[in-house]
Each structure stands twice: as structure tokens, then as C-alpha cells.
Amino acid sequence: MRLLIVEDEERLAKALKKGLEMRGYAADWLSDSTKALNRMLMYRKEYDLIILDLMLPGMDGAILTEKVRQASVTTPIIILTARNETEHKVDLLNKGADDYIAKPFSFDELLARINTILRRPTVAEPVILRIEDVEMNTATHTVKRGSREIPLTLKEFALLECFMRQPNQVLTRENLFDNVWDFNALSGSNVLDVHMKNLRKKLDYETQDDQLFETVRGVGYRIAGAVY
Ligand code: CA
């Protein structure tokens, strides 16, 4: 799941991006309304949801919403508004926003709205994921192989979670990028290889026959094994 945040308040935007990433979403942030409009039009298929601030310099969130809807962009939009007038809220919905939330709001409330729109349960699906002797707890962000606890970075955890949620399936490089990386990381770097290498080093034992990950040449990677 990839979200776009359009917000000119840097502190709020960074907090939102970090909070969303902690919960396994990829999030891009733009503060400029013209850039945001272009991104929303050009990369309409890239995003599952847009969080859009109402009060932006230049074009405001209502105008942006109207413009992208006129261009047939159907990505759900949640508007962050400091205004409380009912009249204005109705206007936002009429312009094509899916929901709005008044500032100040709690992150949990925003998350609940996001999950409602994306039809995801607010309490994440299975909290414990298992394959062979690997156990992942998505609530506490811990991973164990056998009795050995494995410290993972945020990206490594998100990467492993993709595999754990789709066991015995080959995940292509594109799948992994779409689910884990934000837009800036897409520009042809070898960042995926680096993270895969680190993840394998941390998870796999020394012996060849205990390797968790399989490389499927020219396609991607898979973890294979018994799920229980
Ligand atoms: Ca603002």
C-alpha cells in the first residue's frame, strides 16, 4: 500500500510519513501543490490513497481535489482541514473528497479513517506470521528464527513481512518495491539488493540446506516452507 501525503507543514508531514511507515505503508510526501497535482495526475495508479491538506499555498486542497477528479483520477482522498464549518465539509465531499478530518487529530483516528477507506481492519490481520521456524510478530515488530531473536531495521522488517504474508510465492522486484519503498527510492538504485543481502545474512543459518530465501533467477525471490 502506497500513500501520498500533500502537506506544507513539515513537522506534521514527517510525523505522518513516519507513523504510516511504522505500520507498513509506503508514504511519499510533497509540500508543493503544483508538484502534487502533477504527481496525482501522472502517477494515478501508484497510490492507494492521498492525504491532502486543505490550506496549501497556491492551489488549496479543494481545488486540487476538483482538478484531479475532473481528470478522472479515482484514488481515495482524505482532506486535512483546520476549518470546522459544516458548509465547507459538504463542499469538500461534493468536490470529490472521500473523507475529511479536522486538525488537530490523533494519528490513530486518521489511521482508522484510512483503514475504513481501504477496507482494511484497523487491527492488522494475523499478528503472528509463521513459516518453518521463523516467527514474526507484526504488533511488537519482532522476528525470531527458532529461539534466536533477529533485530531488523524498519525496511528489512517490511520486506520480510511481504514474504511472510505471501509464503511460497515468487515476489518480483517490482512487487517488493511497490510495497516497501517510497517514490524517491525507485530511481534505479540497488537498494533492494542491499536490503535483501542484509536480510538473508541476518536470517539464514550458515549451512546451505537451511536457507530460507530462494532466488528465482530473472524473476525475484521467494521463501518456501511450511506455514502453520
Ligand atoms: Ca497547511
Image (tube, rainbow, N blue to C red):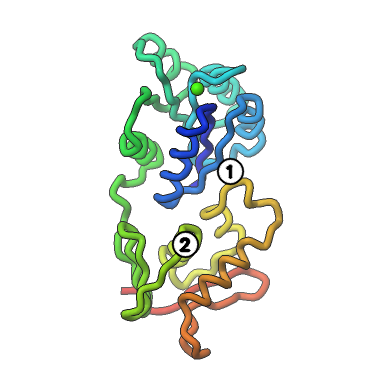
Measure how far apart labels 1 and 2 are at the Cα level: 25 Å
Asked whether the viewer can see residue 228, the reply is yes
Residue at the disc numbered 1: 46
Residue at the disc numbered 2: 153
13 or 23: nearer the eye? 13
| Callout 1 amino acid | Glu
Asked whether the viewer can see residue 116, the reply is no
How far across and how far down the image is residue 45, in percent? 59, 41
How far across and how far down the image is residue 134, in percent? 37, 75
Q: Residue furthest right?
A: 188
| Callout 2 amino acid | Thr
Q: Give the left or right position of residue 182, taking residue 38 as reference.
A: left
44 or 55: nearer the eye? 55
Q: Name the residue at 51% across, 35% down.
A: 5
Q: Name the residue at 54% across, 20% down.
A: 56
Q: Name the residue at 35% across, 74% down.
A: 149
Q: How many marks?
A: 2
> SS for tag 1?
loop
Q: Would you place residue 2 above or below residue 149 in this image? A: above
> SS for tag 2?
loop
Disc 2 under 8 Å from ligand 1? The reply is: no
**Does the residue at mark 1 contact the one at mark 2 (Cβ under 8 Å)?**
no
Q: Name the residue at 66% across, 35% down.
A: 42
Label 1: how many Cα within 10 Å (few below 14, some 14–19, many 20+): some
Residue 113 sits in quarter: top left
Q: Would you place residue 186 above or below residue 39 in this image? A: below
How far across and how far down the image is residue 137, in percent? 32, 64
How far across and how far down the image is residue 110, in percent? 36, 34
Q: Give the left or right position of residue 209, taking residue 143 as reference.
A: right
Q: Would you place residue 190 above or below residue 216 in this image? A: above
Label 2: how many Cα within 10 Å (few below 14, some 14–19, many 20+): few
